[in-house]
Image: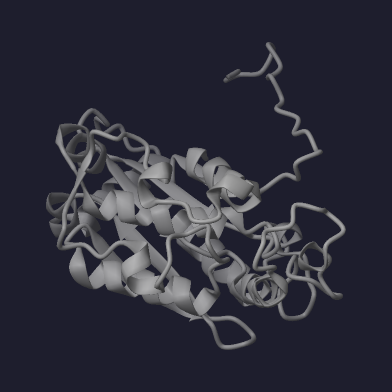
Amino acid sequence: MVACLAFAKALTAQTLVDPTLSYYLPNPSTTYNSEISTPQEVLGYVPGKWHVTHDKLTEYMRVLARESDRITLENRGTTYEGRPLLLLTITSPQNHANIEQIQADHIALSDGSNASTANMPIVVYQGFSIHGNEPSGSNAALLLAYHLAAGQGAEMDELLNNTVILFDPSFNPDGLQRFAGWVNQHKNENINPDSYDREYSEAWPGGRTNHYWFDMNRDWLPVQLPESQARIETFHNWMPNILTDHHEMGTNATFFFQPGIPSRTHPP
């Protein structure tokens, strides 16, 4: 979430037309494995300079999977426009060596298993930009994936030893590609923050929806679209403890966080 907010800030701030990678990373004292490619080494620019297209996003995820023993990559199918529905599994090399047993033990908990969870890693599903024209998610995914693949130190080791991250860098590849093509094509040499600028006024149907102009944030229950079918199958195969769906809000919009109802069984 921090990366999403930082990315949105970078794209709208005149002073960050040329952001540096260190601007986004969470802790200046963290060291990174130099054998893992940075986003700019693959894309040709630091995220925030341009909106990432889905093909470039996919390319970078494949590079990370080749270079890092913390990441495995699978293609769960394609969109209507033929784009891959990638899933990265990110965890420690030790967990990867035992990943099938970890998955089986985790699923057993949903079936009433009384096994101790003390040494079980938590399972977190992170998905980005189900609305393709809410791009901060997928652009931040570049940075988060790099951080998880290359970050070094005791804190990172503890995180990866205790977590299996199911990482879905683009919930809506076709919409993301459509949006990125528009805004990159109409971007000014001198950044214009005017909300009426052509860059911010997509031609219909825009990038919110998938190939058939369906809002995939309305397909969690019907599960009619290939993107949703891959996502929900992954969910049921793992039954993650946490699922995050990285959206984006406009600069003049607020977001309501439900504080919880005290009478609920598990209030926050």
15 vs 157, nearest the viewer = 15
Question: Is 2 displayed left or right of 118 in the figure?
Answer: right
Residue under the point 17% across and 39% down: 157
User: Residue 178: x, y in percent?
Assistant: 68, 77
Question: Where is residue 51, by image quadrant?
Answer: bottom right
**Residue 130 at x, y percent in the picture:** 64, 60
The colouring scheme, among rainbow, by chain, secondary structure or one colour, is one colour
Front-most of residues 50 and 110: 50
In the picture as drawn, the residue positioned furthest to the bottom comes out as 82
Of residue 44 and residue 114, the one placed in the foreground of this image is: 44
Q: Where is residue 252 in the image (x, y as percent from the top left)?
A: 81, 38
**Residue 204 as seen in the image, left or right of residue 174:** right
In the image, what residue occupies the spot 27% across and 46% down? 105
Determine the residue positioned at 75% across, 41% down: 251
Residue 204 position within the rendered picture, expressed as x and y whole percent measured from the top left? 86, 75
The answer to which of 118 and 70 lies nearer the viewer is 70
Asked if residue 61 is positioned above or below residue 97 in the image, the reply reads: below
264 to the left or right of 107: right
